[in-house]
Amino acid sequence: MDNKKLSHLEFVQGVINRLGTNSFLIKSWCITLVAALTVLSSGTKEQYILVAYFPIIIFWFLDTYYLWQERLYRAKYNEVRNQKENTIDFSMKPSTKSYQDNQYLSTLFSKTIWPFYIILLATVLLFMFVFHD
């Protein structure tokens, strides 16, 4: 593989790695924030348990965005991998076909996203009914 193509693949792979790291951090922050709100609600302020639903929903959409972008850049990686050396232009924009193949809504309910957030929502719901009157 030539240097020009290899450099472009490294650029795209760097973006993919950052998006994966962001997704992991979003899940970590979501659990931390929901746990803190749950602990706060176990005292006298029961309304905090209802507030715990908002970060779950917000982080679900944000995590979906990062996974969607990661899928677009994986498609870009394959596109660059299949390009000839003389057509490499170091463009980082995903192709129109990538957007057609990878829809945001399908990512929102993908098997890597929805189980985590549904379980988190169910846990908060269970906590609300078990530990509160």
Image (spheres, rainbow, N blue to C red):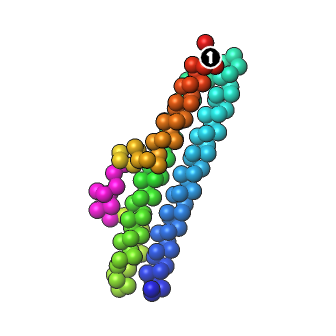
- The crowding category of the residue bearing disc 1, from other C-alpha atoms within 10 Å (few below 14, some 14 to 19, many at least 20), is few
Badge 1 amino acid = His
* Count of numbered tags: 1
Helix, strand or loop at label 1? It is loop
- Residue at the limit of the structure toward the right, as seen here: 43
Q: Circle 1 is placed at which residue position?
A: 132
Q: Quadrant of the C terminus?
A: top right
Q: Is residue 128 above or below residue 86?
A: above
Tell me the residue at 61%/43% (across/down).
Answer: 29
Left-right relation of 78 to 18:
left
* Magenta stretch: dominant secondary structure: helix
Residue toward you, 86 or 44: 44
Left-right relation of 14 to 77:
right
Tell me the residue at 46%/76% (across/down).
Answer: 8
Query: Which region shows up in magenta?
Result: 95-104
In the rendered image, residue 128, in percent from the top left (x then y), is placed at 58, 21
In the rendered image, residue 80, in percent from the top left (x then y), is placed at 38, 74
Q: Is residue 57 above or below residue 22?
A: above
In the picture, residue 77 is in which quadrant? bottom left
